Amino acid sequence: MLKAYKYKIKPNKAQEELLSKFFGCVRYIYNWGLNAKTSAYKENGKAVGYVQLAKELTSLKQQKDHEWLNECTTEALQQSLRSLDNAFTAFFRKKANYPNFKSKKRTKDSVKFINSVHFDFDNWKVKLPKLGWIKLCKNRIFDQSVCKQGTCTVSRDHCGTYWCVITVDDLQPKPTKAKLVKGNAIGVDLGIKDYATLSDGTKFTNPKHLEQSQKNLAHLQKVFARKGKDSKNHESMRVKVAKCHRSITNKRNDFLHKLSAHLVSNYDTICLEDLNVKGMEQNHHLARAIQGASWSEFVRQLEYKSEFFGKNVLFIGRFEPSSKLCHKCGYINQDLKLSDREWVCPVCGEVHDRDVNAAMNIKEIAFDKQNLVGVK
């Protein structure tokens, strides 16, 4: 199975300067390839593939005004063209918008390596092409004698911190999926006030890290806006704002990882609703709260962790009346509003907690009706 290991690295000043050159070269080649693809399609109506761009890259590096590209490794430049090719593939499959040019200020700096990457976990160092040995911060390790290393991505975030992510194939088969049994299954209803409500009545409160840090973030952004551009104070405040954003992201990810790990470790089957998050974000009264909840990231974590441990993730259709349906008698309350947190069934008299009732219906629909969007 493929796994990723992330390490914080601490390059020296010479290595930082060389990495900055790498980032600039990779960004330039990406934009150059995007311009070549767009121009060729507008002029001739033909698509330019990776192979043709890679051949033109070789001749481009030999030109006098582009000799500085030789400071970067060839495979890093080629991987930049691969990333561009993947971006167009996602666009044609309608999974992403048309690729944009990378900006020096707004785009996250990153460079990819494949060959000649060596890890020394005894001394906590990593060797990268043209960069030499770089200090690693301690984290989980993997067995290099057994595992097959994949792509190594070195990046620099907006706070100026350097990270190294390595994909590793442990050459182990995926575990067998658990049987679809109701007894050890759980329905999960995602919300804003309570982040997740389970069909057994358990509720996990939404910590709302973005809202809690909103006052401090607004103050930092206000001070940042007053600083003169291209000044030391402007750059100093930019880093403080970036660190505040990173703190919010880290707290949110910590919560999501703990919750997803809890569900995967305690239940064999997890039933969810296929939410249209982008459509829900059109409600401007709830857009910030929905974005801060990161439901899509939570579902992504559940999916890949279920693959690691042989668990099941079931999805029901987004148009199923999970909140309006009485789980006891099947009556559908068409008059239920979003503000109604509890309602009484006029047929059987059952008092429903909106979220608990929805979670129970999600589980029942996933198993009984088998009206599934996907089984993963």
Image (cartoon, helix red, strand yellow):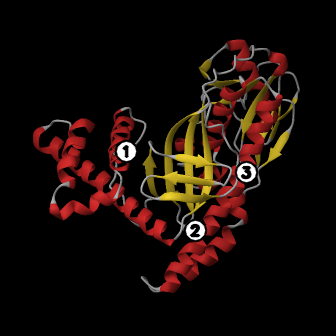
Looking at the image, residue 272 sits to the left or right of residue 262; the answer is left
Q: Residue at horizontal 46%, vertical 70%?
A: 14
- In the image shown, does 149 or 334 lie closer to the viewer? 149
Vertical comparison of 174 with 7: above or below: above
Asked if residue 129 lies left or right of residue 180, the reply is left
For mark 1, give the secondary structure: helix
Judge left or right: residue 252 versus residue 67: right
Residue located 62% across and 73% down the image: 218
Which residue is the site of mark 2?
242
What's the residue type where badge 3 is placed?
A: Asp
Neighbourhood count class around disc 1 (C-alpha, 10 Å): few under 14, some 14–19, many 20 upward: many
| Quarter of the image that includes the C terminus | top right
Q: Residue at x 88, y 26 (%)?
A: 349
* Between 59 and 313, the one nearer to me in the picture: 59
Res 273 → quadrant: top right
- Residue at mark 3: 254
**Residue 49 in sight:** no
Q: Is residue 81 above or below residue 135?
A: above
Q: Secondary structure at mark 3?
A: helix
Where is residue 346? Give x, y as percent.
83, 26
